[in-house]
Amino acid sequence: MMCDDSIWYPKGIAYIFFTAHDAKKPDESYDYLNSLWSNTDDKRKAIYYNSRWFASGVDLAKYDPNLKCMA
């Protein structure tokens, strides 16, 4: 579990991957991001939460309607 907080975020916090700032080596940055994405997904999902990937905030809210914060 990434960044668990037993009071506010017992399942961890949601991470949204959408940019690579100050990437001097784009190919290397892409490889790092690509290693995070599942090769079996029909399209890349940018939200990672509770060891799962989600394509949208709507999908995440369906999975965990009690999640207090979503960008």
Image (cartoon, rainbow, N blue to C red):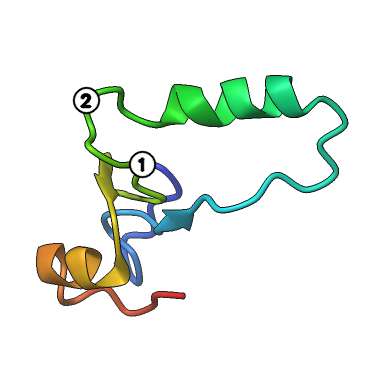
From this viewpoint, is residue 68 visible?
yes
Q: Nearer the viewer, residue 16 or 29?
A: 29
**5 sits left or right of 21 in the view:** left
Q: Which amino acid does label 2 sit on?
A: Thr
Residue 20 x, y percent position in the rendering? 70, 44
Q: Which amino acid does label 1 sit on?
A: Arg
Q: Residue 56 carries which label?
A: none
Residue 8 x, y percent position in the rendering? 35, 71
Q: Which mark is residue 44?
A: 1
Residue under label 2, please give it. 40
* Separation of marks 1 and 2 at Cα, in angstroms: 9 Å
Residue appearing at x 39%, y 75% in the figure: 70
Q: What element carries label 2?
A: loop
Q: Nearer the viewer, residue 49 or 59?
A: 59
Residue appearing at x 16%, y 67% in the figure: 64
Q: Is residue 59 above or below residue 15?
A: below
